[in-house]
Image: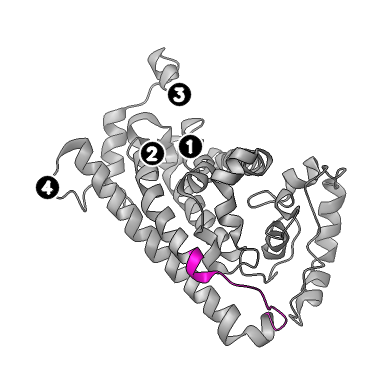
Amino acid sequence: MILAETFGLISIDRELRATQAVSHPAYAGASFTFGLEGSLGEYISTVMQTLIFGTILYFTLSLSSYYYFFRSNKNIYLPNFKGHLLIRHDIFLSLINLICETFLVAAIRVTYPRYSLLYYDVNEYGIPYLFLSIIFHVLYDETLTYWIHRWLHTFPYLYTKLHRHHHRSKDVTPFSGFAFHPLDAFAQALPTFTSCFIFPLHVNVQLIFGLMTTSWAISIHDNVPALPFKLLLYSTHHTIHHEAGTGGMKNIGKFTSVWDRLMGTYEEPDRIDFGWQNQKSQLQKLKWLNDIYETIVPIKKKVKQ
């Protein structure tokens, strides 16, 4: 993108972008500058806002989900769940991740108005392109996240040094959603934050997908298949992914199961049943939709474990 601007292939008013960025409600560069000016003050403020917001969001989502599914309604949703939980480990690792990854994420955020194709006025590209860009983002995010995650399991050095920390929890809870080595989490989050350097993306679309990524990370660790539409990689898919042995090379994708089905790393989640009485009926309600999806995207031969 920088080369495209340099050679005059595209033209962006960077001063206007900077003004629009500062005027947007999500702008983080002015709240916590601690008297510092310029880019450094903007960066420090962005670090602080990202850390505070991320920490509040993590504990709000994980605590509410854990309390609802694992405490107050465990006899309904998880009566047969008797896992060995590493909640303290997951919370501690999540806090380390939040603190360290924030510095990397903030560095990307401050570059948006300066170097990215992130835009702020819907009319600049129009409504049809807005929806088209969402498709572009999903394709970009799903593809890169699948392969990054798969490489973290494929190469022993990457798994041992980075990803094994997340897989220490074989029996997961919502607190596991952020329990990553910071570099592991950052690598898997990069597609969410970098698509706007490849093609124009509205700032609100980028923010929404950022929130969806966070919420999804918590929800897929609750072990409750509330919406068993198999286009999605929902919680019991991810329960399998955390199983000891070869579980890690199954159900690798992010939001959808498309790449897993195409690449032979998909495993059906239906065998995971912790006693929720409505699990089979929920699956039955969506059988017609799952049948259509499975016809369009059949499962390829499974990869060798």
Q: Is mark 3 on a helix, strand or loop?
A: loop
Disc 4 marks which residue? 35
Is the residue marked by circle 2 packed among few (<14), some (14-19), or many (20+) residues within 10 Å? some
Residue type indicated by callout 3 = Met
Is residue 85 inside the magenta stretch? yes
Give the structural element (helix, strand or loop) at label 1: helix
Q: Is residue 32 left or right of residue 171?
A: left
For the residue marked with disc 2, what is the amino acid?
A: Ile
Q: From what the image shows, is residue 80 above or below residue 162? A: below
| Label 4 element class | loop
Amino acid type for the residue under numbered disc 1: Thr
Q: Which mark is residue 1?
A: 3
Name the mark on residue 108.
2
Give amino acid for label 4: Gly
At 28% from the left edge and 53% from the top edge, which residue is drawn? Answer: 48
Image location of residue 15, percent across then percent down: 26, 30
User: What crowding class fits label 1: few (fewer than 14 Cα within 10 Å), some (14-19), or many (20 or more)?
Assistant: many
Quarter of the image where one finds residue 98: bottom left
- Nearer the viewer's eye, disc 4 or disc 1? 4
Instruction: Look at the numbered discs 4 and 1 and tell me whether their residues touch, using CB distance below 8 Å.
Output: no
Q: Which residue bears the numbered disc 1?
A: 194
Q: Nearer the viewer, mark 2 or mark 3?
A: 2
Inter-mark Cα distance, 3 to 1: 11 Å
User: Pointer 3: residues within 10 angstroms few (<14), some, or many (20+)?
Assistant: some
Specify which label sits upstream in the sequence, 4 or 3: 3
